[in-house]
Image: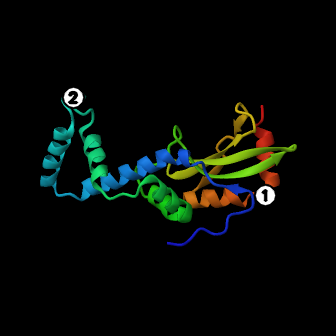
Amino acid sequence: MTQRPEAQSGEIAVDREALRPMYEAYRRRQARRLVSMLPRESIRPLYRAVLDARSVDDGAPGDPLEALVAHCATLLPLPPFPVWAADLARFPDAHLRDLDDSAEGPSPAEPLALAARMVDCGGVTWTARLHVFRADGAWRGFIAFEGPSLGDTCRTAVVFRESTPEELRARFLAFEAVALGAFLRSSLP
């Protein structure tokens, strides 16, 4: 794995709580991979263990496969959230490749905040976050802006299209502050 190149000036870390959905998706991907590697005759006893672990009040699980995947995620020695988040910060490209190879990933309804930078507009500091998702065989993205007040939010239309999430992040980080300011001004109501 290669380490992340030096961050550009103005780049900030993505909020750790915003990473929770990405971490849970990582856990599901790893559990699905385990299920896909198991011999067919091992699935039924494993699912029986899922049913046995449920209390009578829980009733039958809604989706048997998802119940099996959730159970397998508890069996795997996966890193806890703080360790995973530190690894993501250190080797983001490896995590992005894992997302790129996955059938599960950010969608237009639930995009992933991939990178963030500070931008100054008229003496006011805003946070610009790159949100990405996969659609129609490509990675796409838009920039969401958060101002100093709680209600100060706006976003661009989908303005990025690349073949990998790494390319999206690189393009976003390569923008000069003037370009980000122009995106912000064009997004303000």
**Label 2, on which residue?**
59
From the viewer's perspective, tell me whether residue 140 is left or right of residue 106.
Answer: right
What is the spatial separation of the Cα atoms under label 2 and label 1, in whole angstroms? 55 Å
**Label 1, on which residue?**
176
> Residue 126 at what x, y percent from top left?
76, 44
Q: Secondary structure at mark 1?
A: loop
Q: Nearer the viewer, mark 2 or mark 1?
A: 2
| Residue at 24% over, 39% down | 64
Q: Nearer the viewer, residue 84 or 93?
A: 84
| Residue at 24% over, 59% down | 37
Look at the image and tell me in which quarter the C terminus lies: top right
From the viewer's perspective, tell me whether residue 8 is left or right of residue 19.
Answer: right
What's the residue type where badge 1 is placed? Glu
Categorize mark 1 by other alpha carbons within 10 Å: few (<14), some (14-19), many (20+): few
Q: Nearer the viewer, residue 143 or 53?
A: 53
Q: Secondary structure at mark 2?
A: loop
Could you tell which of marks 2 and 1 lies nearer the N-terminus? 2
Q: Is residue 133 in view?
A: no
Residue reaching furthest to the right: 122
| Residue at 35% over, 55% down | 30
Please, is residue 48 above or below residue 62 in the view?
below
> Residue 21 at what x, y percent from top left?
47, 44
Q: Is residue 93 in view?
A: yes
